[in-house]
Image (spheres, helix red, strand yellow):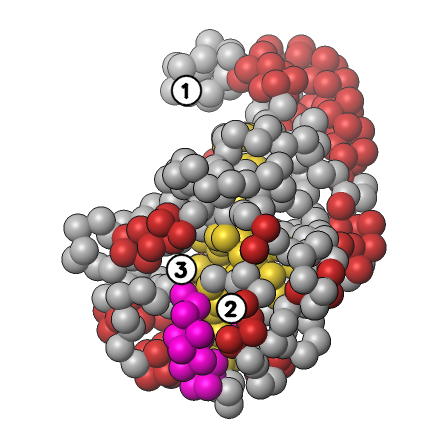
Amino acid sequence: MRLRFEPSLQSSSVSVGGVVALLGLASAGCSPPEDDIDLRADPVVVCAAGATLNGIDVSVYQGQIDWAAVRSSGRVFAIARVGSGNPLDANFDANWAGMKAAGIVRGAYYYFRPTASVTGQADAMIDAMRTLEPGDLPPTLDVEDTGGLSATELTRRIHVWIDRVQAATKRIPMIYTGLYFWNDNVRSSDFGHHPLWVPQYGVTCPNTPRPWTNWHIHQTSNTGRVSGIQGDVDLNKFNGSMADLQAFVASTIIGSGSDGVGDGGSFGGDGATSDVDGETDATATEGGGSGDDDGGRGGMDAAVADGGARDTVDAAPVSGDGAVRDSASSAEAGAGAADASSEGPGGGGSSDGGCDCAAASARAPRARAVALIAFAAALSALRRRPRRADRQ
């Protein structure tokens, strides 16, 4: 698939939002209203709750695929591209039928071109999938192109596609997007109840964009090697066991009594084996198995090959318990509380919720010192953030 690489910011000790807020306090005697500050929450880092399943996603670039060989390599699910904008993938029909014949849990995605006809793209998705069968994955919208549109207009057009496809398929669509793309360009909390497929290479616990606090599928590499496919292919992990995958599919069926997948909840816990990297049993590992399974490489070696050490920057320790971890700094929280305690609604400022400017001016030197320290820490944490490059 088209990767927007999402580097890890798990080790950042001070959030950018906190620095912005502190600098605002330091540069003026009176703090602006909170609504006027872009308070960026630190990324939420989410580990798999237990077992994971191996899968792939493919497009026209993979050419003709031997799906029986793919299944024999341990891949239990796969998602094929229907099209990109108006052009459709010529081999989608073959992939769609081949996945089912091989016993692979199949899905389809559409690379969203927001400036092309949105209803046309939705109808192309509906026509290609025809009637989804009970075991099929929900339709997916791949959101990683702004088309130069504003966040408001981009969100509106995403709604058009999602609503049209959902009404026709009676499935809750999944969204593929990355932390930085979504937070920077879409900035919408409207789709938090849709399942999330997130790309991030070089980590086992990806960062989720707002408003999601969990993920269903994690794209781990775009340089995998799998039997039955010539050349590179995207590798993915499902967050759970086979029973969890089946339950997830059922939960996306509208009217099933369990629809409304939200952030995914907790997966795993059925006794399936998994090691510290979240792998399943040996028949479905990314490497180290049969000679041609991923070229014999370890699961994250492919990501390193596509960019070297950049894919492993700032990887934080993993708790291994599937917990959701927020990296918000306690130091930032303490500084914010100290300055906010006497300002704004409920504080000791003016009766209308404003600020006491004289008191704020008196605090300015201390706030400025705190801001400079925080700014230096943030620069240190972010200086190795790699450039994000898109590829279709």
| Other residues around mark 1 within 10 Å, as few (<14) / some (14–19) / many (≥20) | some
| Disc 3 packing (10 Å; few <14; some 14–19; many ≥20) | many
The quarter holding residue 267 reads top left
In the image, the segment drawn in magenta is: 92-112
Whether residue 252 sits left or right of residue 150 in the image: it is left
Q: Which residue is mark 1?
A: 345
The label nearer to you, 1 versus 2, is: 2
Tell me the amino acid under the disc marked 1. Answer: Pro
Q: For the residues marked 3 and 1, what is the alpha-carbon distance in whole angstroms? A: 39 Å
Quadrant in which the N terminus appears: bottom right
The quadrant in which the C terminus is found is bottom right
Quadrant in the picture for residue 315: top right
Q: Earlier in the sequence, mark 2 or mark 3?
A: 2
Residue that numbered label 3 is attached to: 174
Type of amino acid at the residue the image marks with label 3 = Met
Inter-mark Cα distance, 1 to 2 = 59 Å
Q: Mark 1 or 2 closer to N-term?
A: 2
How far apart marks 2 and 3 lie (CA) works out to 23 Å
Q: Earlier in the sequence, mark 3 or mark 1?
A: 3
- The structure residue drawn at horizontal position 55% and vertical position 15%, both measured from the top left corner, is 337
- In the rendered image, which residue does mark 2 sit on? 71
Q: Residue at x 43, y 86 (%)?
A: 93
Above or below 205: residue 291: below
Provide residue 342's location: percent of width, then percent of height. 51, 11
